[in-house]
Image (spheres, rainbow, N blue to C red):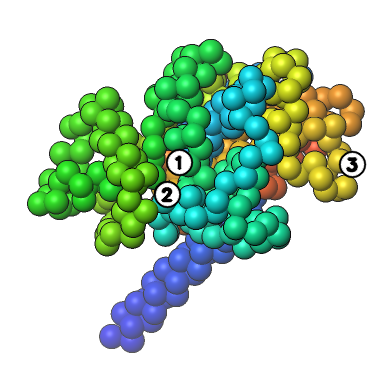
Amino acid sequence: MIKKILFGMIIVVVMAAMAGGYAIYSFFPEDDFVARFALENPSRSAFLLVRNDTVIGQQNLHQPMPLGSTVTLIIAIEFAEQVGKGWINLDEKVNKNELLRFYVPHLDRGAHNNWLNSETYISYGDSIPIIEIAKGMIQYSSYANSEWLMNRLGTDNINNRLLELGCTDHAPIYPFVSSIFIAKEYYTTKKDDQLLKAINNLSEEQYNDYALSIHAKMLQDVEYRNQPIEITETTQRIWSDRLPAGSVSDYVTLMKKLNSKTYFDKTTQTVLNEIIETSMSEPSIREFYHHIGIKTGATPLVITKALYAKDRKGNTTEMAYFFNDLDAQEIKKMDLSVKDFDRAVLRNTLMVQKIQKLYSSYE
């Protein structure tokens, strides 16, 4: 009897140690975690790293993945192009209340509130320069700013820009804040699996049309966004899975255009620099980089990133990695590890060599 009790206690201790070890692992950053996770989870990952025009590692190049707010790079480019054409005046001021039409609490992981609390936002009165809206979209990942700009720029213009940029794997961009209301607006009697099945059966065109219809209602009714909406695990997954999708191939090609500083005309490029390269205002960043631009995207299931850089030694880097269907522990681990990973890739030649060797062994 005593042996059985002792054996049971040992099992409990071992299981507790394993659980504790996993918890420690989950909350401990690793600078190569991103590259390893992509290789170990190919059905949920896409990865592409290019250094000095040489492919270092690649996986699922043309697999469209939900992008989160990384897709707003396309919106930023259309914004800069319209400035370059004289369609938008950077001196224009926008009433701050206009942005609230598209603000849905808890949808963007607090991003819009972080922007509202920034010194830049607070420094303006009732109105804010239009370029600050674009910067808030990129720097803070404000979904409300994204949706407002979609309306101002025109979704047709944004999607035509996709074609001009050569993004052949990309799904159309639609108002994705509005889409969170599709279940409430069109499927009030369906719950959980029935709701999931009904919305999954919608074509891309129908889903986007529903989102555009709701977007029009949000424009007309400032209170629309305040209606009660239950963002359950099911509705969150539906929304996340149907976000605009693109491939790492498309986004690294886009990063190369931005990194070259020659693809866009001078005015457009100047605006893009101001919107995307906000970190260049920091002396510690200028010490290492001639220029650098980064855009991340995240939902409770998704982490994505696209970046480009030219360092002070003349090395150029373009990288994109997209992950989908992550659990809470994986999200936490990614959140802790991505900055160390990016820094190691950009500044440590040994890390680049490690990734190259790692991916070559899987080919």
In percent of width and height, residue 145 lies at 52, 45
**Pointer 3 or 1: first along the chain:** 1
**Which SS class for mark 2?**
helix
**Circle 1 crowding by C-alpha within 10 Å: few under 14, some 14–19, many from 20:** many
Residue name at image x 75 percent, y 28 percent: 270
Which residue is the site of mark 3?
A: 287
In percent of width and height, residue 154 lies at 45, 28
Q: Is residue 248 left or right of residue 182?
A: right
**Circle 2 crowding by C-alpha within 10 Å: few under 14, some 14–19, many from 20:** many
In the picture as drawn, the residue positioned furthest to the left comes out as 189
Name the mark on residue 181. Answer: none
Label 1 is placed on what type of residue? Glu
Q: Is residue 362 visible?
A: no
Label 3 is placed on what type of residue? Glu
Distance CA(mark 2)–CA(mark 3): 38 Å
Residue name at image x 75 percent, y 15 percent: 262
In percent of width and height, residue 212 lies at 32, 34
**Compared with residue 164, is residue 75 higher up or lower down, i.e. above or below?**
below
Name the mark on residue 147. Answer: 1
Check if mark 2's residue and mark 1's residue have beta carbons within 8 Å.
yes
**Which SS class for mark 1?**
helix
Name the mark on residue 102. Answer: 2
